[in-house]
């Protein structure tokens, strides 16, 4: 099963949650939400931008369909370019922490690399941290549905990066071998003052030798914020760049079934900034 096929099963569940009199009404609501999401993301650099609320199942469906597979594919491509992450994922039981990882991109991108690389004799533990609890339901069944050739242990934990009481006691972050930030800092940039203590805490608590993968929109506000934080916390920079990233050709969009005939194409190309770092001091 490829990522598109897996996402199709998740979309089926999300589609069934949307309350409407008939499918045509559902489809109209989803199309409207996809357009609204595009508009909301276009204003992320505005300090007064509204918070994006993913509690609505229509919005979650729209995000998964339009963005999750592409963002997962980008993560897989970055891992394919960095041997230190490849080596980590091929040994023992790597533990990954994914703040803001509710939409599933981080987990799916790592899984895609491990399956394509035919990683055997290992397992993956993935701690997904997100404010919206409903995301946990989307990916709780991923191990069973995907039938990966290794054990997968996804664990969802609710937290709000702007509320210290929800994250200060999580020890799982410090235990992680790999820490991912996929299109997350841009979402909380408008709340930079309240959110920065969370990122400072994570970067300071990461253990020596652990790795961090960052990818986001290539806008100076988000990228400069990440770079400034990372430069304060004893990291070795393994990869640093920005470029157009295109979706891989091995994912068949037709695997999205009927949704492919109902809606526009999922995201295919992005102007992205990316970083991979290793913690020097723990």
Image (cartoon, rainbow, N blue to C red):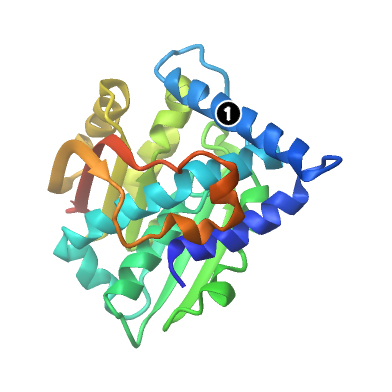
**Residue sitting at 76 percent across and 44 percent down?**
23
Indicate the position of residue 211 as horizontal and vertical percent values.
26, 56
Q: Nearer the viewer, residue 155 or 253?
A: 253
Q: Nearer the viewer, residue 212 or 207?
A: 212
Q: Residue furthest front?
A: 261
Instruction: Indicate the secondary structure of the residue bearing disc 1.
Output: loop
Residue bearing mark 1:
52
Indicate the position of residue 57 as horizontal and vertical percent values.
70, 42
* Residue 96 figure quarter: bottom left
Q: Residue furthest right?
A: 21
Q: Nearer the viewer, residue 65 or 168?
A: 65
**Residue sitting at 16 percent across and 58 percent down?**
81
280 w.r.t. 216: above or below: below
**Residue sitting at 33 percent across and 85 percent down?**
120
Indicate the position of residue 55 as horizontal and vertical percent values.
69, 38
**Can residue 282 be seen here?**
no
38 w.r.t. 102: above or below: above
- Residue 2 located left or right of residue 137: left
115 w.r.t. 267: above or below: below
Report the number of numbered marks. 1
Q: Nearer the viewer, residue 205 or 230?
A: 230
- Residue 50 located left or right of residue 124: right
156 w.r.t. 152: above or below: above
């Amino acid at each position: 099963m490829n990522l598109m096929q897996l996402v199709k099963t998740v979309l089926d569940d999300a589609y069934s949650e949307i309350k409407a009199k008939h499918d045509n009404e559902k489809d109209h609501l989803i199309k409207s939400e996809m357009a609204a999401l595009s508009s909301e993301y276009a204003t992320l650099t505005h300090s007064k931008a509204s918070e994006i609320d993913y509690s609505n199942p229509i919005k979650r469906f729209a995000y998964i369909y339009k963005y999750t597979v592409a963002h997962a594919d980008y993560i897989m491509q970055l891992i394919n370019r960095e041997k230190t992450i490849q080596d980590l994922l091929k040994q023992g039981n790597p533990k990954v922490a994914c703040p803001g990882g509710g939409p599933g991109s981080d987990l799916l991108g790592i899984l895609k690399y491990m399956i394509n690389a035919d990683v055997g004799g290992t397992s993956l533990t993935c701690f997904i941290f997100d404010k919206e609890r409903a995301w946990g339901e989307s990916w709780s069944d991923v191990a069973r549905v995907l039938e990966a050739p290794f054990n997968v242990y996804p664990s969802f934990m609710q937290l709000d990066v702007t509320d210290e009481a929800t994250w200060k006691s999580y020890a799982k972050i410090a235990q992680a071998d790999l820490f991912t930030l996929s299109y997350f800092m841009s979402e909380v940039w408008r709340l930079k003052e309240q959110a920065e203590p969370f990122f400072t805490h994570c970067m300071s608590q990461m253990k020596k030798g652990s790795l961090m993968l960052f990818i986001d929109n290539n806008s100076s506000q988000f990228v400069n914020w990440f770079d400034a934080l990372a430069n304060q916390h004893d990291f070795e920079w393994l990869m640093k760049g920005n470029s157009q990233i295109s979706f891989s050709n091995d994912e068949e969009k037709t695997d999205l079934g009927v949704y492919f005939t109902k809606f526009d194409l999922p995201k295919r190309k992005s102007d992205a900034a990316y970083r991979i770092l290793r913690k020097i001091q723990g």
